[in-house]
């Protein structure tokens, strides 16, 4: 009588394990295929800066406002200095006490740097000690448009040129009498026309 071979210590269901779980494997694979095919993955954090509309107008926050005319960003870049472009066409703000007109004393008119529309005169300019050129009244309010600005966690009133949509600055209610308002403008958004210069033909 021959000696019996030693039995290997193998779980009785080991050889059948893949077959037993085949339905579960199949279901998982099908589910992964459906998720991948139909984009059902959970949405990740949104990135508002991912899409940039190169020629989006500055007034995109208020679709009802349409300036009298507009140009492409490339056209504005060619016309303006880099700082003027960043402020007037991109809505940036120059650093206080650095602009050309914050302490400007000459008599004349302050026009839009983009389209030359008259906006303010030296008669309504005053020293607000804020570091930006300030005016208590506009000489041509019909050339201005205001809208709500909620950037940087603040609620402010943005001032735009109604003619071309340029960003000029912001409007506050802490100005002197008789208006009580302060048009806090960026020097880079303004072009000064000295008094008497407007009477001479422009070249």
Image: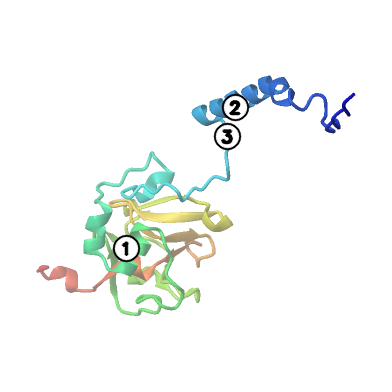
Above/below status of 82 relative to 70: below
Can you say which quadrant of the picture contains the N terminus? top right
* Residue under numbered circle 1: 85
Task: Quadrant for residue 93, please give it.
Answer: bottom left
At which x and y percent is residue 29? 60, 27
* Residue under numbered circle 3: 41
Can you say which quadrant of the picture contains the C terminus? bottom left
Which disc, if any, is residue 29?
A: 2
At which x and y percent is residue 2? 87, 26
- Residue occupying the far front of the picture: 1
Write the residue at 42% across / 46% down: 51
At which x and y percent is residue 127? 45, 76
Disc 3: CA contacts within 10 A as few (<14), some (14-19) or many (>=20): few
Q: Is residue 192 left or right of residue 49?
A: left
Distance from disc 2 to disc 3, alpha carbons, whole Å, reads: 15 Å
Q: Nearer the viewer, mark 2 or mark 3?
A: 2
Q: Is residue 161 left or right of residue 149?
A: left
Q: Is residue 196 left or right of residue 95?
A: left
CB atoms at circles 2 and 3 under 8 Å apart?
no
* In front of the other: 96 or 29: 29
Distance from disc 2 to disc 1, alpha carbons, whole Å, reads: 54 Å
CB atoms at circles 3 and 1 under 8 Å apart?
no
Q: Nearer the viewer, mark 3 or mark 1?
A: 3
Distance from disc 3 to disc 1, alpha carbons, whole Å, reads: 41 Å
* In front of the other: 130 or 78: 78
Above/below status of 11 relative to 140: above
Q: Earlier in the sequence, mark 2 or mark 1?
A: 2
* In front of the other: 171 or 16: 16
At which x and y percent is residue 52? 39, 49
Q: Secondary structure at mark 2?
A: helix
């Amino acid at each position: 009588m021959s000696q019996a071979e030693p039995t290997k210590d193998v779980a009785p269901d080991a050889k059948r394990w893949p077959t037993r779980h085949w339905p579960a494997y199949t279901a998982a694979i099908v589910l992964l295929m459906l998720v991948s095919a139909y984009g059902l993955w959970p949405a990740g954090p949104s990135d508002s800066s991912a899409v940039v509309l190169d020629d989006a107008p500055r007034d995109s926050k208020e679709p009802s406002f349409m300036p009298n005319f507009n140009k492409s960003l490339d056209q504005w870049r060619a016309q303006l200095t880099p700082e003027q472009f960043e402020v007037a066409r991109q809505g940036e703000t120059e650093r206080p006490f650095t602009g050309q007109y914050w302490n400007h004393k000459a008599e004349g008119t302050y026009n839009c740097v983009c389209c030359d529309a008259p906006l303010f005169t030296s008669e309504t300019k005053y020293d607000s000690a804020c570091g930006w050129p300030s005016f208590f009244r506009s000489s041509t309010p019909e050339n201005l448009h205001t809208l709500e600005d909620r950037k940087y966690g603040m609620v402010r009133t943005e001032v735009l040129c109604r003619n071309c949509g340029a960003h000029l600055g912001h409007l506050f209610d802490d100005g002197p009498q008789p208006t009580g308002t302060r048009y806090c403008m960026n020097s880079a958004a303004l072009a000064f026309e000295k008094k008497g210069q407007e009477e001479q033909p422009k070249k």
